[in-house]
């Protein structure tokens, strides 16, 4: 990435329950930018919910669709994109995210991620006997990938969602990204 400003994309990465969708949507609203969520985009294109796609096509089928959406959305400008937690698994996704925008890693520890996701049945990878152990394993596997891809890391343990949105907006301002005022 070279110059940062009005056209710079903002991408959120992190594990399931990190707050990518929630914080990303609020940041987009505050900046007056269009918001995309790769999972919602896949659902809109297929007309099927994520668990159904996993059931019919398995994780490999889902990852193909995810890679397609990431490739298309990272090619655009001035948007905010919340990725799914596994978007960083493919090197080409990591490269596209890193090179085509400012990447923010929302980091949380596996215990907090578990608390935030345990009542939601829409994450197929967590529908196991022991979702907390699964989140711990995913954390070990993916934390280095999020770090490789990210320009900033935001710790999500303590702040409220609103507090996090303000922290992200401050980081973005330091990076030269602010709400565009109409002239
Ligand atoms: N910092 C936070 N503190 C408390 N709850 C949070 C926080 N971030 C997200 N949540 C909640 O956790 C759940 C999962 O958030 P979501 O945005 O779907 O995460 P992701 O898209 O990263 O999987 C939502 O109910 C959201 O309101
Ligand atoms: O971590 C993952 O592999 C996944 C995360 C989910 O998105 P969120 O991170 O928004 O929950 C969704 O893409 C799918 O269930 C797989
Ligand atoms: Mg999400």
Image: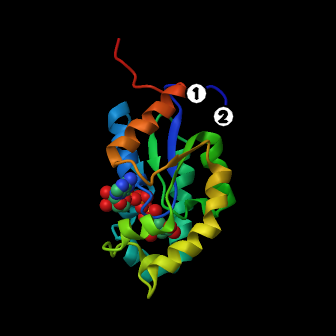
* Closer-to-camera residue (109/131): 109
Give the residue at mark 2. Answer: 1
- The spot of residue 86 in percent (x, y) is 55, 65
Secondary structure beneath dot 2 equals: loop
Residue occupying the point 40% across, 22% down = 180
Is 176 placed above or below 152 here?
A: above
Give the residue at mark 1. Answer: 4
- Quadrant location, the C terminus: top left
Residue occupying the point 30% across, 73% down = 119
Q: Circle 1: is it few (<14), some (14-19), or many (20+) Cα within 10 Å?
A: some
Q: CA distance from mark 2 to mark 1?
A: 8 Å
* Closer-to-camera residue (126/122): 126
Q: Circle 2: is it few (<14), some (14-19), or many (20+) Cα within 10 Å?
A: few
Query: Is the C-beta separation of discs 2 and 1 under 8 Å?
Result: yes
- The spot of residue 162 in percent (x, y) is 32, 43
- The spot of residue 93 in percent (x, y) is 62, 55
Residue occupying the point 35% across, 72% down = 122
- Quadrant location, the N terminus: top right
Question: Does 120 sit left or right of 176 as displayed?
Answer: left
């Amino acid at each position: 990435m070279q110059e940062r400003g009005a056209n710079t994309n903002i991408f959120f990465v992190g594990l399931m329950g990190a707050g990518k969708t929630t914080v990303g949507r609020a940041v987009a609203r505050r900046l007056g930018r269009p918001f995309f969520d790769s999972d919602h985009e896949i659902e809109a294109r297929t007309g099927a919910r994520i668990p159904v796609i996993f059931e019919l096509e398995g994780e490999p089928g889902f990852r193909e669709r995810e890679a397609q959406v990431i490739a298309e959305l990272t090619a655009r400008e001035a948007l905010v994109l919340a990725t799914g937690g596994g978007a960083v698994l493919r090197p080409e996704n990591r490269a596209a995210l890193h090179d085509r925008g400012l990447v923010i890693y929302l980091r949380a520890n596996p215990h907090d991620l578990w608390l935030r996701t345990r009542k939601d049945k829409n994450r197929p990878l967590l529908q196991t006997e022991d979702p907390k152990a699964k989140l711990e394993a995913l954390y070990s596997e993916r934390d280095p990938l999020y770090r490789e891809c990210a320009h900033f890391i935001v710790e999500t343990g303590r702040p409220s969602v609103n507090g996090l949105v303000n922290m992200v907006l401050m980081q973005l301002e330091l990076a030269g990204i602010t709400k565009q005022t109409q002239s």
